[in-house]
Amino acid sequence: MLLATVCSAAVATIYVAQPVLAQIGRDLGVPESDLGWIVAAGQIGYLVGLAVLVPLGDMLDRRKLVGGQLLLAAVGMLVAAVSPTLWLLLVGLATTGLFAVVVQTTVAMSADLSTPTERGRTLGIVTSGVIIGILGARVLAGGLADLWGWRSVYVALMLFLVALSIAVLKQLPADHRSSRRTYGDVLTSLGHLFREPLFISRGLIAFFLFASFGTLWSGLALPLAAEPWQLSTTQIGLFGIAGLAGALGAARAGRWADTGRANPVTGTALALLALSWIASGQAAWSLWLVVIGVIVLDFAIQAAHVSNQSLLTAAYSDKTSSAIGGYMIFYSLGSALGATATTKIYSTSGWTGCVVLGASFALCGLLTWALSRPTVTRVRRDAASLGSGRMDTTPEAG
């Protein structure tokens, strides 16, 4: 639960801006078409951290690594909280994003602490913490922003990150990595993953998955705050509760992965993701349909994400931090694309344009999954023929 809480708090730092974008824009004088950069700044920092910081988890004591990164993320939150200009705000958010990759170090640590038959279940629980952070942050941000302004959101997260850092250093066991591996070794190992068809296919699916996710959650606040609804930031933040219901319902995806159904679960989830946009597209006249769309979308995102991570940590069990970090590079790029493209398209084509964009991302992910099925089958067959070695021999190790 501590590891899940770390993931929840760290990832929340990137997403709390989404329900209060309009308030930040008014306070700092940011045009509507440029608001997406406030979300994208954290994603850009996150992208850099995935490449240069997450591989450290394969060579250093993860307890100290997690504790230190939480403290440095708190520094970024402090800078954001006191920022008088957009540029300083972006610097603070990018800094926080850089060290928010503590999420991936934590996920890799949880996978390594699990047995092969329980890995999917453990990842499902810890990744639920990630989804709680992403969606619960909206509820927290909306309420705090209405009471004390958007800056209070970043102050609250800063204090929570500091407290978590202390808890991690006191509660987690030491986790010494092999001293024979250098930083160059782990970066080379990460680079080699980008030649692996399995890794590339799962990464591309993550790219489209989270581009669709980012499209919904970066843009949904805009039509809800406009006519005919004119919802407050607190009311908009409550839509995160609907997302939590869907995401937590999908925590069982980890158990499905443990029984060899990870790849079918991914395909089914991507199909549901595309269908969810039909309901979410009705924001102009039905809030209930939007709620249904949000629940289905977050269920699909969680199910596909857990299944993908289960496949990768099983396939690359000797370098879980590098595998998760590399996979999440695709995630970060997709999220940043969804955030920036959505606000641009909304300013020209309204919510309808955003819906078409989000559904298109989902369909691209489904197409990638369909085209990669022969690769998954081949990897599974190779693992079975080897009987042991790098790959797990569970039915869906590939």
Image: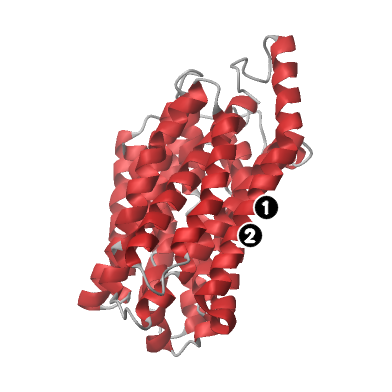
The quadrant of the image that shows the N terminus is: top left
The tag on residue 364 is 1
Residue 329 in sight here: no
Helix or strand or loop: what does disc 1 sit on? helix
Residue 54 point in image, percent of width and height: 57, 45
Q: Nearer the viewer, residue 282 or 8?
A: 282
Give the residue at x 53% y 64%: 215
The quadrant of the image that shows the C terminus is: top right
Against 87, is 254 above or below?
A: above
Residue 35 point in image, percent of width and height: 50, 79
Tell me whether the residue at label 1 lies in contact with that at label 2, contact meaning CB atoms closer than 8 angstroms.
yes
Say what amino acid the circle numbered 1 marks: Cys
Q: Nearer the viewer, residue 232 or 106?
A: 232
Give the residue at x 38% y 35%: 125
Give the residue at x 32% y 47%: 245
Give the residue at x 52% y 50%: 273
Q: Is residue 263 left or right of residue 383?
A: left
Q: Is residue 345 left or right of residue 167?
A: right
Question: Crowding near pointer 1: few (<14 within 10 Å), some, many (20+)?
Answer: some
Residue 293 point in image, percent of width and height: 42, 56
Residue 249 in sight here: yes
The tag on residue 360 is 2
Helix or strand or loop: what does disc 2 sit on? helix
Say what amino acid the circle numbered 2 marks: Ser
Against 382, is 14 above or below?
A: below
Question: Crowding near pointer 2: few (<14 within 10 Å), some, many (20+)?
Answer: some
Residue 267 point in image, percent of width and height: 59, 38
The tag on residue 39 is none
Against 286, is 168 above or below?
A: above
State how far apart marks 1 and 2 are (Cα): 6 Å
User: To which quarter of the image does residue 177 belong?
Assistant: top right
Farthest right residue? 195
